[in-house]
Amino acid sequence: MHFSLSSLLLLGISSLVSASSLTITIPVSSPLPNPHVLPATSHATLTTLPSGGKDHILSASLTRSATFLFRDLPSSNSDAQPESYLLDIRSAGDYVFAPYRVDVAADGSILGIWETFRGNPWDNHQ
């Protein structure tokens, strides 16, 4: 099964004391009427574009509430810069999720979320 943007509910970013977090919720949908059937090995990654020759990869495991919680996004301080992430959700079995671009402002708010494709120019938001 392939899930598009309408199948994912991206809840946003909340500020913590020293870092931001991003919670991604897999909602009930017609292709996946019970998100709790996803295998416990399901996980999500956020990858930044390479800077200085290195990618920054964050990983989150599926929780019992069918969410992925990234707790270690860069802190929202005066020196923070906007960041773009590639979101990948991987699950064994019949479930395949489309990749997404997630743009986060320096203050930790979400600027936008777009379905993307490998090889798609990063500036193309459609």
Image (tube, helix red, strand yellow):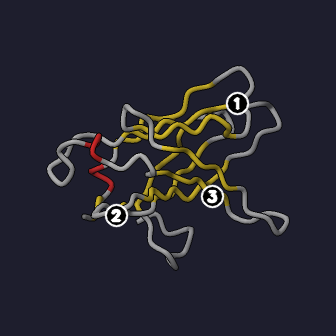
Q: Which mark is residue 47?
A: 3
**Nearer mark to the viewer, of 1 and 2:** 2
N-term-proximal mark, 3 vs 1: 1
* Quadrant including the C terminus: bottom left
Which residue is painted at 74% across and 34% down in the image? 75
Check if mark 1's residue and mark 2's residue have beta carbons within 8 Å.
no
Badge 2 marks a residue whose secondary structure is: strand
Observer-nearest of 77 and 24: 24
Query: Which x, y percent locates residue 90?
Result: 44, 59
N-term-proximal mark, 1 vs 2: 1
Q: Is residue 15 above or below residue 85?
A: above
Q: Is residue 112 above or below residue 4?
A: above
Name the residue tied to disc 1: 19
Which residue is painted at 64% across and 32% down in the image? 20
Mark 1 to mark 2: distance in Å? 30 Å
Mark 3 to mark 1: distance in Å? 17 Å
Q: Residues within 10 Å of mark 1 (few under 14, many from 20)?
A: some
* Quadrant including the N terminus: bottom left
- Circle 1: residue type: Ala
N-term-proximal mark, 2 vs 3: 3
Q: Which mark is residue 10?
A: none
- Circle 3: residue type: Thr
Mark 2 to mark 3: distance in Å? 18 Å
Name the residue tied to disc 2: 96
